[in-house]
Image (cartoon, helix red, strand yellow):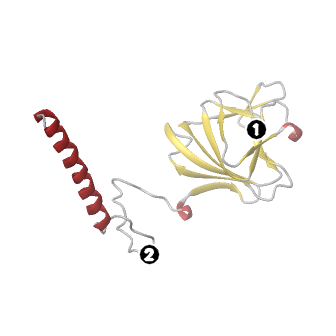
Amino acid sequence: MRTDIKYALTAVIAAGLGATGFAAMAQKDPKVGVTVNDPIGPVPDPARVTATLPKDFKCSGTVGKQEMCILFGDPAKPGPYMVMYKWYPGNFSKPHYHNNVRWAYVLSGTWWTSSSNVYDERTTYPVHAGTVAVDKLNGIHWDGARLGEKEPAVLILSGNGPNITQGVDENGKDMGPPR
């Protein structure tokens, strides 16, 4: 047999045996394939990973109408932020826009939104759970949840602050912060 073919064949066989050996070791490694029934690990080092429990969220608004909870950051301050909104059935914001782009993910329920300057709940469009929506820079819109929904619309919104909300009249002219 030619020497170059012999060396190539030897390398292929060695690589295959090496891979088989590593696979066999992985199957016997007690650190692999852990289940929920095994003991839990230590709390992560907060210098590397943090977690905020729902009981520790800072929330504002009114249960049964609209609530906003800060998940991280602060929409009123410079920098990234993330908030959770709960829109209860029969409650809507009024036409407004924001000074920054905001990204929304609908976690549950149906979020109803409109891009009309005129507040008329018949102009709202359903945005269902699992959908991503974007509030464009200075894009007039308003939103909430229609009466008859079985659950609140729950959304996660993120952006870069400071976020300023500006209300508009039926002609799209600034009216100051929404009431």
**Residue 87 image point, x, y percent:** 73, 51
For the image, the number of numbered tags is 2
**Residue 125 marker:** none
Tell which of 46 and 169 is nearer to you: 46
Tell which of 37 and 128 is nearer to you: 37
Q: Residue at x 80, y 59 (%)?
A: 150
Tell me which corner region of the image, top left, top right, bottom left or bottom right, holds residue 1.
top left
Q: Is residue 151 left or right of residue 105?
A: right
Circle 1 crowding by C-alpha within 10 Å: few under 14, some 14–19, many from 20: many
Q: Residue at x 40, y 74 (%)?
A: 38
Q: Give the labeled residue for mark 2.
A: 37
**Residue 19 image point, x, y percent:** 26, 52
Quadrant where the C terminus sits is: top right
Type of residue at label 1? Trp
Q: Give the labeled residue for mark 1.
A: 142
Tell me which corner region of the image, top left, top right, bottom left or bottom right, holds residue 67.
bottom right
Circle 2 crowding by C-alpha within 10 Å: few under 14, some 14–19, many from 20: few
Vertical relation: 55 (above or below) 112: below
Vertical relation: 51 (above or below) 16: below
Q: Is residue 91 left or right of residue 53?
A: right
Helix, strand or loop for disc 2: loop
Tell which of 152 and 6 is nearer to you: 6
Residue ranking furthest to the left: 3
Q: Residue at x 36, y 57 (%)?
A: 46
Vertical relation: 178 (above or below) 147: above
**Residue 26 image point, x, y percent:** 29, 61
Q: Residue at x 50, y 40 (%)?
A: 80
**Residue 9 image point, x, y percent:** 19, 41
